[in-house]
Image: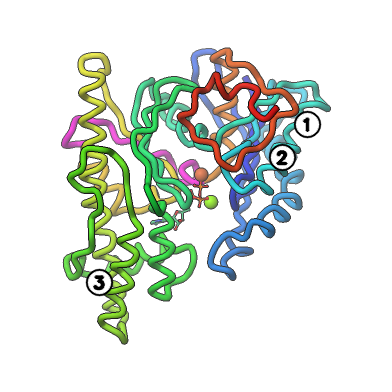
């Protein structure tokens, strides 16, 4: 199967052509991503209206470029897959409408893809990972621990009850006067900092449920910065390092419990349990090291897809479409509506025909 994928849910405009062969092996034939980072950095965050306009301007060209790089034309494509949620509604409309138009004009099936399903299935494209496995999604908009059971069958084991982890990085950076996006800036500053200088809170640590909470951390950072004003560069480095340290310890506890639950649930049936990480925060080396160590200790494979496939891209959307088609799941009607909110663990079958 050759699938054309379209992604416009946030601040990346992306198009991709992905191949899935009969054995389930995947290959990215052409992949282009245009980040709107510069358009938004002035405002310190994504501005929905600017994002939607930028998607409109770029998408057609990106789709042509993806097809060209893949060395195919539309007639070689078996289906169109477009992100239809969750995300910013303006951007979703642009991508989904474009997908529908191409599907109608070329008489190909359209798959309306949940963006989170794209993240969830990426490790099967990159590593051919068999079901079931655990996935930690840590991005600007999401922090979720998901059991990936099968195509379209997901269980959300944990989620943030307030800020997403990437959001915590971004807000912390803003508080400290570091540039947007905050993740890379905080990580850079932390390199020369003392991770033990501040003891920041580790919410929910020790609790049996697998949820996350990061808003208290941001408040603690603000208080720390205020208590030592004027802050020096070294203070900022220490705060950033201590911030990452608190996150590491929190994740060790939270994810550690998740791994234990997985082992309990699949005792004897899953030979090589695996944890996959996805989302922009997966770029963070401290976080990667923490998860790697945790997995090593618990006998799990740790899989971190290449960074450009951890952040938003259309290859994962095309791949999710390919997996759905190969699994025999029905394509979507052309009147399917985008959904700004769309939890991944809603029953896949109940979602068919949603929006009518
Ligand atoms: P979503 O995909 O959930 O809709 P998004 O587009 O904001 O949201 P991504 O593009 O996957 O998510 O990731 C962006 C987030 O990743 C930002 O919050 C950014 O600060 C964070 N991030 C990027 N690099 C790093 C890093 N090295 N350390 C920590 N966080 C990082
Ligand atoms: Mg993004
Ligand atoms: Fe994403």
Q: Regarding mark 1 in the picture, which secondary structure is present there?
A: helix
Q: Residue at x 66, y 55 (%)?
A: 51
Eyeballing the image, is 174 above or below 163?
A: below
The image position of residue 97, as x and y in percent, is 75, 37
Residue highlighted by disc 2: 63
Residue 335 occupies which quadrant of the picture? Answer: top right
| Sequence-first tag of 2 and 1 | 2
Q: Badge 1: how crowded within 10 Å, few (<14), some, or many (20+)?
A: some
Q: Regarding mark 2 in the picture, which secondary structure is present there?
A: helix
The image position of residue 200, as x and y in percent, is 23, 63
Q: Are marks 2 and 1 in contact (CB under 8 Å)?
A: yes
Highlighted magenta segment, given as a residue range: 295-311
Residue highlighted by disc 3: 238
- Asked if disc 3 is less than 8 Å from ligand 1, the answer is no
**For the residues marked 2 and 1, what is the alpha-carbon distance in whole angstroms?**
10 Å
User: Looking at the image, how many numbered discs can be counted on the residues?
Assistant: 3
Q: Regarding mark 3 in the picture, which secondary structure is present there?
A: helix
Q: Residue furthest bottom?
A: 230
Q: Badge 3: how crowded within 10 Å, few (<14), some, or many (20+)?
A: many
Q: Badge 2: how crowded within 10 Å, few (<14), some, or many (20+)?
A: many
**Nearer the camera: disc 2 or disc 1:** 1
- What label sits on residue 102 in the rendered view? 1
**For the residues marked 3 and 2, what is the alpha-carbon distance in whole angstroms?**
45 Å
305 part of magenta stretch = yes
| Sequence-first tag of 3 and 2 | 2
């Amino acid at each position: 199967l050759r699938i054309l994928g379209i992604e416009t849910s946030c601040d990346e405009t992306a198009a991709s052509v992905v191949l899935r062969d009969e054995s389930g092996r995947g290959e990215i034939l052409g992949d282009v991503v245009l980040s709107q980072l510069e358009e938004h950095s002035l405002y310190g965050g994504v501005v929905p209206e600017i994002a939607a306009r930028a998607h409109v301007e770029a998408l057609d060209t990106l789709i042509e470029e993806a097809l060209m790089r893949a060395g195919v034309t539309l007639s070689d494509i078996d289906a169109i897959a477009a992100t239809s949620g969750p995300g910013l509604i303006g951007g979703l409309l642009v991508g989904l409408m474009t997908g529908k138009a191409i599907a109608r004009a070329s008489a190909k099936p359209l798959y309306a893809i949940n963006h989170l399903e794209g993240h969830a299935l990426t490790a099967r494209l990159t590593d051919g990972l068999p079901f079931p496995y655990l996935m930690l999604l840590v991005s600007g908009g999401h922090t979720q621990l998901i059991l990936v059971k099968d195509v379209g069958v997901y269980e959300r084991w944990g989620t943030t009850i307030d800020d997403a982890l990437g959001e915590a990085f971004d807000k912390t950076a803003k508080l400290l006067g570091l540039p947007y996006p905050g993740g890379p800036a905080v990580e850079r500053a932390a390199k020369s900092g003392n991770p033990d200088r501040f003891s920041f809170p580790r919410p929910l640590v020790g609790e049996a449920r697998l949820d996350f909470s990061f808003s208290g951390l941001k408040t603690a950072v603000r208080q720390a910065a205020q208590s030592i004003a004027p802050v020096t560069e070294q203070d900022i480095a220490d705060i950033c390092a201590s911030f990452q340290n608190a996150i590491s310890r929190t994740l060790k506890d939270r994810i550690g419990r998740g791994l234990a639950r997985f082992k309990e649930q699949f005792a004897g049936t899953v030979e090589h349990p695996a944890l996959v990480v996805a989302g922009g925060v997966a770029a963070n080396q401290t976080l990667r090291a923490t998860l790697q160590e945790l997995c090593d200790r618990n006998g799990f494979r740790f899989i971190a897809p290449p960074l450009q496939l951890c952040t938003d891209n259309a290859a994962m959307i095309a791949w999710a479409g390919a997996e759905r088609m190969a699994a025999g799941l029905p394509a979507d009607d052309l009147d399917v509506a985008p959904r700004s909110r769309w939890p991944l663990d809603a029953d896949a079958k109940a979602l068919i025909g949603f929006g009518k």
